[in-house]
Image: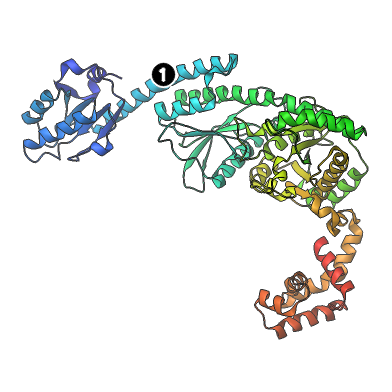
Amino acid sequence: MRLRALLENDSLGLRLLGGEDELDRTVRGVMTTDLRDPSRYLSGGELVLTGLAWRREPEDSERFVRILAAAGVAGLAAGEAELGAVPEDLVLACGRHRLPLFSVVEDVAFATITEHVVRQVSGERAGDLAAVVDRHRRLMTSGPAGGGPEVVLDLLRSDLDLAAWVLSSTGRRIAGPTAAGAAPEPPAEVRAQLAGEQLAALREGRRGPHRMTGADGVTYSLFPIRSGDTGDDVRETVLSDWLLVVGADADEWPEERLDLLHGVTQLIAVERDRRNASRTVRRRLAQEVLELVQTGAPPAEVAARLRVAAPVLLPGLGTAPHWQVVVARVEWGVTAAEYGGGGAREGVARESGARQSGVREGGRAGSAPGGGGAPGGRVAQSLLEEILVDPYASGPEPSDRIAVAYTGDEAVALVPLPALADGPYDGGVDAEGLHADALLAAVREPLSRGLDGDGRLTLGVSAAVHSADGLRGALEEARHARRVAAARAGRVCAAGHQELASHVLLLPFVPDDVRRAFTARLLDPLREYDRRHRAELIPTLEAFLDCDGSWTRCAARLHLHVNTLRYRVGRIEQLTGRDLSRLEDKLDFFLALRMS
């Protein structure tokens, strides 16, 4: 706004005392101060309001005005409440420095002027930014000339003083302001919280923007960035959509500003759709390789297809020395009772005889079994593309090294591991390749909230293989690992190939009645004794087995005297009729604890 506009509003109580030739200056903000030197708080373009408490002698006016002029303020408004009429020495000082001077009548509060200026300036900035956003929307719709989300986020920062970031559904940073002086992005823990809150709000049908105070004490406003290919069922896209996070409380924003931010999300959605479309080639490569593997094609034919895929997934690195297979499944209509108890094991048993057929490229999905028709395979495909992003990868989009197809309700990822040729590196990968727990460590919280109510994600990871000969076995290995994960409690579970050589593979397939009878016979007497005497026999048994039957290590872990530990173990043997010095009895207790 212009200084001249202030005189057009009689309710502001302003009277011009000097600087009529400078009234076309632009006002970019407002500041109230009675400091003798407010320069550190000035950035230029402000209308400065002062009650003149800094003035103790006439010479103070020259010093004060010189500071304001050097800072590039737009004008000065002096209140009449403190000294009555504005002192002549202040009028002369403003004249010498060509600084427009206003007087403010006694019955008008500075807050009234401040509110008016802020409202006018914010409205004008929003209008200017809206025009810029509209221009970039047209540019990005027709091609990449708009510059990407960072350009718009920089505009929000410079024009509206809003710090904003684009996050994935798991809290991974997609884009943020790049201009100097931008606010630091939320830490990883807070980003995961924000993503989880957004997913929960969308699943519950709450209208945005959503507000949340993070663990860092900052209040954020969350705006969903919906994909352009959304279907009728929100579950198809909610787990893969982006979100715009603004470091401000939008609860009392005017409609104009909210409309502007919604326009920004639509603009960024264009980039979201473009990046999603760029995955088509990689998805097709995965589809072709997996079709060959599943149909039993000769290894030479699979190897030839891998040689075609490697340059696309690993530009400039040639053929990948190792490959890994990751399998994911998203199921809907799953209750906590079903995956936390016998229902999950029954589902695993039913699934063990089933085999998927016909790998489909993303975009044409089947429906989830008994889960209300949401396409689990396509959702799992998008989630794998997000989960498998290497945070250390270079390039404009880290997911350009991931190829994921899906078969029915199951997504299958073909992951090249170039680093294994030269040794370990960070990012959840070492000499054995990807690890299941590491993959989900950072994304379990937000995805659990997005799946809460009726959804479940299970994931299995194969060992690394160095040739096409091993891919079929790697695929079956990943599928078996995923079934082990499906037998565990939780909305988001994973298992790796390391667990397939252990008893853990067998436990999910033990019938429920056998499990209950076995654990009750061994553990119920101990639980009842603990309930009546608070003897902590169950924790003692767990620690004793975990210490491989070592009396000294177990006593140290439990902070007990060895004699006390011997008494407890003797009580366990007395109540159960077992002997913990025998390997067979130790194994029975171990299995009972794992199945309980």
Label 1 neighbour load within 10 Å: few <14, some 14-19, many 20+:
few
- Position of the C terminus by quadrant: bottom right
Residue drawn at (77%, 44%) of the image: 458
Residue 99, picture quadrant? top left
Mark 1 — residue?
Answer: 128
Q: Nearer the viewer, residue 172 or 261?
A: 172
| Percent x, y of residue 431 | 72, 50
Left or right: residue 130 versus residue 18 is: right
Residue drawn at (21%, 17%) of the image: 23
Left or right: residue 352 versus residue 267 is: right
- Position of the N terminus by quadrant: top left
Q: Is residue 165 visible?
A: yes
Q: Nearer the viewer, residue 323 or 170?
A: 323
Q: Residue furthest bottom?
A: 563
Dot 1 falls on a residue whose secondary structure is: helix
| Percent x, y of residue 40 | 26, 39
The mark total stands at 1
Colour scheme in use: rainbow
User: Which amino acid type is shown beneath numbered disc 1?
Assistant: Asp
Residue drawn at (92%, 33%) of the image: 298
Left or right: residue 123 versus residue 44 is: right
Residue 291, picture quadrant? top right
| Percent x, y of residue 511 | 91, 56
Check the image and report above or below for 252 versus 470: above
Q: Is residue 341 visible?
A: no
Residue 36, picture quadrant? top left
Check the image and report above or below for 471 versus 561: above
Q: Nearer the viewer, residue 161 or 393?
A: 393
Left or right: residue 193 versus residue 439 is: left
| Percent x, y of residue 542 | 76, 70
